[in-house]
């Protein structure tokens, strides 16, 4: 059964650890993440971007696949199915499709419009018992065609959105999606501390978890980050393992061309990466 991320976030904040959101792209991705979470007894959030949802033929397909997989695999750890960087319209589609959590990213709107739409969606999520994440200050890099420069969020605006009753708040602190450039200055802990001071016991979300040094991750968790998003690192691990399998000619040996065999090294690589991240975030054994 899918659950809201609310209890996960409350426990993570109190326990000074973070729950990983791992984005899914297909059946292999979903299966690898769920099995690893179960093995490590860690709560987990499955993130679905609108682009990935479209690729998997729609949010209804995604929700049906995840719910069936949780049942068939006997998954007992808490699992939230979460819309990542959702549009206003996308949030309603995911609510209808049966997601247990949504993110509304209104960071590209003027603040008043972000506030109005966030207010409405927080009310909807509250009525239905879903968790909701909202964003202030865009995250850098590119995700599904949305390009952000990674500006730092205004702590006062963060407080205004947090006071709506959001479950968790994504605030830009210099983090970016995708690979970090060599000249990246690092996370702004000054901004994070100022936001934390304003919002109090609000679980904060760190987007763009790929490539942030471990010590920065741990410091961010100590300052109130309770959810960390990982996507690119799993993609890179999958790509490297798949490339190695083909370059070694294993797809030409016997029935190595069988997609179940061809995709298996990538599947195992995702499991290894998710395990590594869950251990770093401190969520192992917290289910």
Image (cartoon, grey):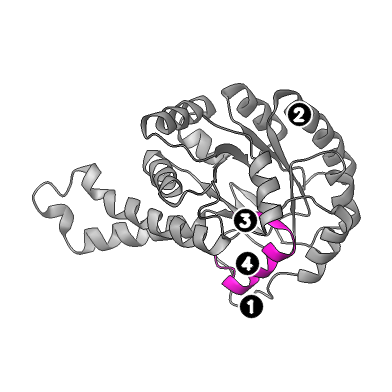
CA distance for labels 3 and 4? 10 Å
Q: Dots 1 and 4: beta carbons under 8 Å?
A: no
CA distance for labels 3 and 2? 23 Å
Question: Mark 3 or mark 4: which comes first in sequence?
Answer: 3
Which callout, 1 or 4, points to the residue nearer the camera? 4
Q: Residue furthest left?
A: 254
Q: Which residues are magenta?
A: 210-228
Q: Position of residue 250 (x, y in %)?
A: 16, 57
Q: Nearer the viewer, residue 257 or 24?
A: 24
| Mark 3 surroundings within 10 Å by alpha-carbon count, few (fewer than 14), some (14 through 19), many (20 or more) | many
Residue 18 is marked as 3
Q: Dots 3 and 4: beta carbons under 8 Å?
A: yes
Q: In the rendered image of this protein, does residue 79 appear above or below residue 189?
A: above
Question: Mark 3 or mark 2: which comes first in sequence?
Answer: 3
| Residue pointed to by mark 2 | 126
| Residue pointed to by mark 4 | 217
CA distance for labels 1 and 3? 27 Å
Question: Mark 2 or mark 4: which comes first in sequence?
Answer: 2
| Residue pointed to by mark 1 | 183
| Mark 4 surroundings within 10 Å by alpha-carbon count, few (fewer than 14), some (14 through 19), many (20 or more) | many
Q: Nearer the viewer, residue 233 or 159?
A: 159
């Amino acid at each position: 059964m899918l659950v809201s991320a609310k209890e996960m976030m409350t426990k993570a904040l109190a326990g000074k650890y973070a729950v990983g959101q791992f984005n899914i792209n297909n059946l292999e991705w979903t299966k690898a993440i769920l099995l690893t979470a179960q093995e490590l007894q860690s709560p987990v959030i499955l993130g679905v971007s609108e682009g990935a949802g479209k690729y998997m033929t729609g949010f209804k397909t995604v929700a049906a696949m995840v719910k069936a997989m949780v049942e068939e695999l006997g998954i007992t750890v808490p699992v939230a199915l979460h819309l990542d960087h959702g549009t206003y319209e996308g949030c309603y589609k995911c609510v209808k499709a049966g997601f247990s959590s949504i993110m509304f990213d209104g960071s590209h709107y003027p603040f008043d419009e972000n506030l109005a739409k966030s207010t409405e969606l927080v009310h909807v999520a509250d009525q239905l018992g879903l968790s909701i994440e909202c964003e202030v200050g865009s995250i850098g890099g590119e995700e599904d065609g949305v390009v952000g420069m990674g500006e730092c969020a205004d702590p006062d605006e963060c407080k205004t959105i947090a006071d709506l009753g959001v479950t968790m708040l994504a605030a830009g602190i210099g983090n970016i999606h995708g690979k970090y450039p060599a000249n990246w200055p690092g996370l702004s802990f000054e901004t994070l501390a100022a936001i934390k001071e304003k919002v109090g016991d609000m679980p904060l979300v760190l987007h763009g978890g790929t490539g942030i040094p471990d010590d920065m991750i741990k410091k961010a968790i100590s300052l109130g980050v309770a959810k960390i998003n990982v996507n690119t690192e799993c993609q890179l691990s999958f790509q490297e393992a798949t490339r190695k399998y083909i370059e070694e000619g294993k797809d030409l040996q016997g029935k190595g061309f069988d997609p179940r065999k061809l995709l298996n090294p990538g599947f195992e690589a995702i499991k290894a990466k998710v395990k590594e991240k869950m251990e770093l975030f401190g969520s192992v054994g917290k289910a």
